[in-house]
Image (cartoon, coloured by chain):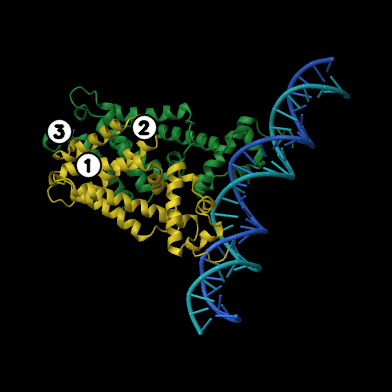
Chain colours: A yellow, B green, C blue, D cyan
Amino acid sequence: MGRRNDHTREELQNLALRTAAEIVEADGPAALTMREVARRIGYTVGALYHGFTNLDDLTVRLNERTVSELRLALENVNRQTNDSGQRLRMLAAAYLGFALLHTHRWRLVFEHRLPPGQEAPKSYRTHTAALFELVEANLPASACGRSGSEAPIIATALWSSVHGICMLAVSGKLQVGTTASVQKLLDTLLDRFLVEHSAKPRVTRKR
Amino acid sequence: MGRRNDHTREELQNLALRTAAEIVEADGPAALTMREVARRIGYTVGALYHGFTNLDDLTVRLNERTVSELRLALENVNRQTNDSGQRLRMLAAAYLGFALLHTHRWRLVFEHRLPPGQEAPKSYRTHTAALFELVEANLPASACGRSGSEAPIIATALWSSVHGICMLAVSGKLQVGTTASVQKLLDTLLDRFLVEHSAKPRVTRKR
DNA sequence: CACGATATTGAACGATGTTCAATTAAATGC
DNA sequence: GCATTTAATTGAACATCGTTCAATATCGTG
């Protein structure tokens, strides 16, 4: 009791976040509770509330780390390839790889909801924005129409699509089981975005 | 107390499920609790456990209804259009429309997780499969390669992508705010799948 | 060494899911 | 019509959760 000084306030937060990551990875998002974290790091529940305002706070800060890690992984992949089309394929593969390797943590990022009115921290959006820019930078000019002004829209559409495939695959809501077949879905999608995109067929278009 | 017979066992389950839907729609997935449902339908918590084995069961059966409703909506749209390319665009628009209209219920379908080992009921998969078949049936032949043997893969890739865009949009994780701009993302995606798909560029392909 | 600051505890509160004996009302048999 | 079976419903209990907070123990400092 009292100030044990085993850890500084910052060390304790790191410890808690690392432990939280372990819990989530091992037993899924629902297993993440204040009390379990406290138990594992050898403190009382109350002590946790000095470093975190509540469970949402802890969760958001764990997610922040996950997103940051994901960004790092993708930026590494991006650096290791020359051809930009190739890069897009490898980025998608790396995204899927991360989702498969850190499934529960990755899902927590997208499934956690803050109470209405609250917003995720800025660094959160920063990392996300960086990911989309990575995609946008690797879009082949042939895919972006004449002016290229639609590049952000195309990048968003493409990456949201990659995300959708990964999410459904990882959640088991797709019939496909093997990693290879999910890869094939991603390849199929990317084929559509990497090929030269001709004029839209006026006949069947709606607006 | 005792057999009140205000409602048959089946009526009570219907009542509970309707109430559950209202709770979720109004206050989000986290607000759905056994006790709240019981409170609103004027029964004790224990009584609920005669019709539902637990909260997961109630949730799954609520989700079943939602998916069924979604399927109906899409099948209606499918019936109201002739051109198949047009149909795909309208199906995507209807999917987004449903997600926007019944946001919380729709999210519950994809965010709820059963404890490991348990599987969602068969009707669940039936409805989902029907949706993918709807998409597959409307894929233009030009989009499916020579043999058309890849149609299921293409349909899965396309619809998972549509789903991804809707999910990120509905969750507010996309910068885009307006419904119109989300529509534009869907249109951009569909443009890629509705246009004649030429041979894949061998140079930039990986496998 | 004493004092003030603060990290940490421990207990409390209200809420949750789930279980189950007890109770009560309907259905059935006579 | 009455007694007995059957089953719906209750109410209370238990374990867990998030969160708060007064009390306490320990540290840094004067």
Q: Is residue B34 above or below residue D8?
A: below
Tell me which numbered mark, 1 or 2, is placed earlier along the sequence. 1
Q: Position of residue A138 (x, y in %)?
A: 18, 48
Residues at discs 3 and 1 both on one chain: no
Q: What mark, if any, has residue A195 been given in the picture?
A: none
Q: Chain of mark 1?
A: A
Say whether residue B8 is visible. Answer: yes
Q: What's under tag 1, amino acid-wise?
A: Met
Q: Report the Cα–Cα distance between label 2 and label 3.
A: 25 Å
SS for dot 3: loop
In the depicted view, which residue is nearer to us: B65 or A99?
A99
Residue wearing tag 2:
A174
Q: Report the Cα–Cα distance between label 3 and label 1.
A: 17 Å
Q: Quadrant of the N terminus of chain A?
A: bottom right
Q: Chain of mark 2?
A: A
Q: Chain of mark 3?
A: B
Residue drawn at point x = 56 percent, y = 60 percent: A46
Q: Is residue B155 above or below residue A107?
A: above
Residue drawn at point x = 65 percent, y = 30 percent: B8
Q: What's under tag 2, amino acid-wise?
A: Leu
Q: Report the Cα–Cα distance between label 1 and label 2.
A: 22 Å
SS for dot 1: helix
Q: Quadrant of the C terminus of chain A?
A: top left
Q: What mark, if any, has residue B200 been given in the picture?
A: 3
Q: What's under tag 3, amino acid-wise?
A: Lys
Q: Position of residue B196 (x, y in %)?
A: 17, 32
Q: Residues within 10 Å of mark 3 (few under 14, many from 20)?
A: some
SS for dot 2: loop
Q: Is residue D13 above or below residue B63?
A: below
Given this view, does label 3 or label 1 mark the residue nearer the observer? 1
